[in-house]
Image (tube, rainbow, N blue to C red):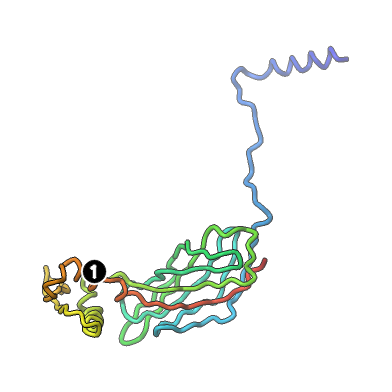
């Protein structure tokens, strides 16, 4: 009987063409069942700070990411976006996030605009206790276009300089058809680089919150 089985195996082996690939099962993606998925509404959905309304209606947890939809009012037509944000939970704080534009309604005719983004925080441990998680928008900002300095920012910058006793005078001149902010005068003891560092500081186009929202996204 053993001889018959052995002969059968040898016969079948001889039927396989030389060099023919052996079929192997394709690997399947491993999905860790410990990666949770959950969605929740915040304890409070609307926060107001520095004249900016920020609204968050929901957040959701999907594996190692937590995402939320954030809408905030726009005071002018500058390109405002979330500048810094954080997620706090019992095990630590996450500041690594990405932002995706959902919708944009620009400010027009004295009416405030509205921008909505999806913020996603990364690399959250799947076993993290998110029963009390706080998502905070720390600041929003709009990197000015060259023409924005004269149209929007120069009065605010000049006022701040005057209030601080910094003897720097600003003005606007035409450069290739575009009104461009210039430093017209400064103290002799101040270098041009020092004056520009003060005048073009991001403090003048950043609005600080915080706007904080608390969720229960499970343990």
Position of 24 relative to 148 (above/below): above
In the figure, is residue 54 to the left or right of 124?
left
Find residue 191 and report its image quarter.
bottom left
In the figure, is residue 4 to the left or right of 118?
right
Residue 151, percent from left and from top: 22, 79
Residue 99, percent from left and from top: 44, 65
| Residue labelled with disc 1 | 197
Q: Nearer the viewer, residue 75 or 202?
A: 202
Position of 196 relative to 157 (above/below): above
Residue at image point 63% right, 40% down:
27
Total number of numbered discs in the rendering: 1
Q: Quadrant of the N terminus?
A: top right
Find residue 43 and report its image quarter.
bottom right
Q: Quadrant of the C terminus?
A: bottom right
Q: Nearer the viewer, residue 110 or 75?
A: 75
Position of 110 relative to 55 (above/below): below
Find residue 59 and report its image quarter.
bottom right
Residue 146, percent from left and from top: 21, 70
Q: Nearer the viewer, residue 13 or 204?
A: 204
For disc 1, the neighbor class at 10 Å (few under 14, some 14 to 19, many from 20) is few
Residue at the far front: name it: 189
Residue at image point 55% right, 61% down:
65
In the figure, is residue 219 to the left or right of 174?
right
In the figure, is residue 212 to the left or right of 108?
right
Residue at the far right: name it: 1
Q: Secondary structure at mark 1?
A: helix
Position of 73 relative to 119 (above/below): below
Residue 126, percent from left and from top: 62, 58
């Amino acid at each position: 009987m053993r001889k018959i089985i052995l002969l059968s195996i040898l016969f079948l082996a001889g039927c396989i063409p030389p060099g023919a690939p052996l079929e192997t099962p394709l690997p399947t993606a491993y999905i860790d069942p410990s990666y949770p998925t959950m969605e929740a509404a915040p304890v409070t959905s609307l926060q107001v700070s520095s004249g900016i309304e920020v609204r968050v209606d929901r957040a959701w947890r999907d594996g190692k990411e937590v995402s939320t939809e954030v809408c905030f009012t726009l005071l002018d037509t500058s390109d405002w976006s979330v500048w810094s944000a954080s997620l706090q939970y019992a095990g630590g704080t996450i500041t690594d996030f990405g932002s995706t534009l959902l919708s944009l309604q620009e400010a027009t005719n004295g009416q405030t605009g509205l921008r909505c983004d999806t913020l996603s925080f990364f690399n959250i441990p799947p076993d993290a206790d998110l029963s009390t998680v706080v998502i905070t928008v720390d600041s929003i900002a709009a990197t000015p276009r060259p023409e924005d300095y004269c149209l929007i920012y120069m009065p605010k910058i000049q006022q701040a300089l005057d209030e601080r006793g910094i003897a720097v005078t600003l003005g606007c001149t035409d450069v290739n058809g575009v009104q461009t902010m210039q430093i017209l005068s400064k103290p002799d003891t101040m270098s041009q680089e020092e004056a520009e560092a003060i005048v073009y500081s991001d403090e003048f186009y950043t609005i600080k919150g915080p706007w904080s929202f608390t969720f229960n996204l499970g343990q």
